[in-house]
Image (cartoon, grey):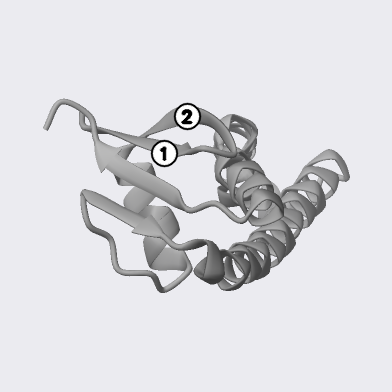
Amino acid sequence: MALIQFSSVAAGPFIMFKETVEEIFKTISEPFSPKGAWGAEDLSDVLRRLEAAEVRDKAEARRREEELEAMSRASFCFDPAMKGREEELAKLIKENEARINFYQRVVPLKSMIQRAIKHKKPVMWEMMGG
């Protein structure tokens, strides 16, 4: 599995799986390349797009939680429509609890970008070992 390292003079480096980075770039409508950089002048816009995507993802996570909660309540209230779906519900709850949401994945990148903005430094990334 390929890894991407982010770095900036303003913050310590960190690594992410390439697939995660590709997902982040796609979500913020940013073209991905295995090596690149955002100039200090571009970081405010990148951060704005990350934060907008984070808000959308948090809303989706809340919606999923509410849906599972409603299913759980219906199950415990012996709703006939839920009869026989207990295993399905348990599986959905377990998957949701194990899920790492977009807004959680972008924390190190947001932190680096915020520091880079403060210090007027670029953020770079490159594939490790390649």
- Is label 2 in contact with label 1 (beta carbons under 8 Å)? yes
Sooner in the amino-acid sequence: mark 2 or mark 1: 1
User: Label 2: few (<14), some or many (≥20) within 10 Å?
Assistant: some
Quick one: quadrant of the N terminus? top left
Q: Residue at x 29, y 54 (%)?
A: 36
Q: Is residue 84 visible?
A: no
Residue 19: percent from the left, percent from the top?
A: 30, 44
Residue 124: percent from the left, percent from the top?
A: 38, 47
Q: Residue at x 47, y 29 (%)?
A: 13
Q: Circle 1 is placed at which residue position?
A: 6
Front-lying residue, 11 or 59? 11
Q: Amino acid at mark 2?
A: Pro
67 lies above or below 9: below
Residue 24: percent from the left, percent from the top?
A: 44, 56
Q: Residue at x 22, y 29 (%)?
A: 128
Q: Circle 2 is placed at which residue position?
A: 13
Quick one: quadrant of the C terminus? top left
Left or right placement of residue 111 versus residue 12 in this view = right
